[in-house]
Image: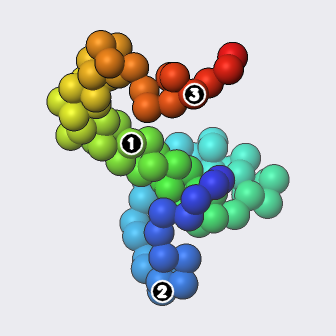
Amino acid sequence: MSNIIFDTTAPKKSANLSINADLLQQAKRLNINLSQTLEQHLAEIIRQAQRSQWLIENKKALDVYNRRIEKQGTFSDGLRRF
């Protein structure tokens, strides 16, 4: 996981969850820390959702920028030697 997106020092809070009994049994047998696993995967899902939301919210600006670059190029186009 890169770039922590939540306060890792925030206190823990209990939550009631329902989980497939077979998955729970296998996780316990393998000593998988359910809280840690949920936090890791939830953080990744949140990161992906925030990225998607950001792209939607900024689509217009990105499209305008990309059209300008296609027409005018970038500042460094005349400076590059490759």
Three-letter amino acid code of the residue under disc 2: Pro
Q: Residue at x 63, y 64 (%)?
A: 36
In the rendered image of this protein, does residue 3 appear above or below residue 55?
below
Q: Quadrant of residue 72?
A: top left
Earlier-in-chain disc, 1 versus 3: 1
Q: Residue at x 63, y 54 (%)?
A: 2
In the rendered image of this protein, does residue 69 appear above or below residue 44?
above
Query: On residue 51, which mark appears?
Result: 1
Q: Residue at x 53, y 43 (%)?
A: 20
Three-letter amino acid code of the residue under disc 3: Leu
Query: On residue 38, which mark appears?
Result: none
Mark 3 Cα within 10 Å, few/some/many (few <14, many 20+)? few
Earlier-in-chain disc, 1 versus 2: 2
- Whole-number angstrom distance, CA of label 3 to CA of label 2: 52 Å
Task: Report which residue position mark 3 lands on.
Answer: 79
Q: Is residue 59 left or right of residue 40?
A: left
Task: Report which residue position mark 2 lands on.
Answer: 11
Three-letter amino acid code of the residue under disc 1: Arg
Q: Is residue 49 visible?
A: no
Report the residue that reaches farthest toward the top: 71
Earlier-in-chain disc, 3 versus 2: 2
State the image coordinates of residue 53 (x, y, percent, origin top left): 28, 41
If the image is split into quadrants, where does the C terminus sit?
top right
